[in-house]
Image (tube, helix red, strand yellow):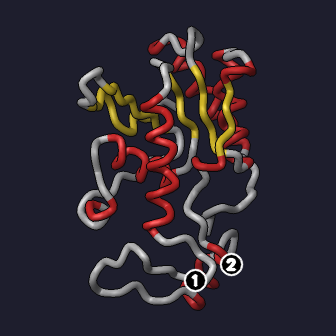
Amino acid sequence: MGGKSNWNLTEKGKEQARNIGKWLKQYEGCQYSFKMYYSDLPRAAQTAEGINEALNIPSQNLIKSELLREFNLGEGNGKPRDWYKDHAATPPKVYNPDFRSLPDAECDTEFYARLKKFADEIRSNKDERILIVSHGGALGMLQSILIGGTIQDIPKRVFMGHSGGVTRFVIQPNGQVEIDYFNLWVS
């Protein structure tokens, strides 16, 4: 299980990151006045580096954030799926945001609160154009939050990204959120 593991990006992942950077430069003009926020876990940091090979965003506009880490599976981080299946608690039949699959794992309430804090930070700053490089589960939760989702919405609405995918959100001055494209595969 991936989770909060300190894995390095594969060669395929590095190539995907470079391709995303080239695409963002060509189609989005991302080399101009952008800030890039990225998870401090190695695979996301390495993805941000690969993207930035094409964009050359100045170092002062590259912001590492622990808030963008993937869901913390506790003892299950980095363990094989079979180990996780043998050791994780069975989820309740009725959704409980405080459920923990392992005693030291993060629950959805904590995961949501962490990513809500990040969403509130980016909404409150003056930066108009930002890039976010993170992980599938974290990006899915963040996307739900950006369109107004609450912790109670989790069982009804789950977004998941895929490696090499790009999503574009536009937050209007009135707070309305538009999704220009979602999980567009550019690599």
Q: Residue 184 sits in which quadrant?
A: top left
Q: Nearer the viewer, residue 139 or 18?
A: 139
Q: Mark 1 — residue?
A: 102
Q: Nearer the viewer, residue 107 or 11?
A: 107
| x and y percentages locating residue 93 in the rendered image | 29, 86
The residue depicted at 33 percent of the width and 25 percent of the height is 170
Tell me, for residue 17, which label it has, or none.
none
Amino acid type assigned to the residue bearing label 2 in the image:
Glu
- Helix or strand or loop: what does disc 1 sit on? loop
Sequence order check, earlier mark of 2 and 1: 2
The crowding category of the residue bearing disc 1, from other C-alpha atoms within 10 Å (few below 14, some 14 to 19, many at least 20), is: some
Alpha-carbon distance for marks 2 and 1?
Answer: 7 Å
Answer with left or right where residue 74 lies relative to residue 144.
Answer: right
Q: Mark 2 — residue?
A: 75
The residue depicted at 70 percent of the width and 46 percent of the height is 40
In the image, farthest residue toward the front = 124
Q: Is residue 184 above or below residue 108?
A: above
Amino acid type assigned to the residue bearing label 1 in the image:
Leu
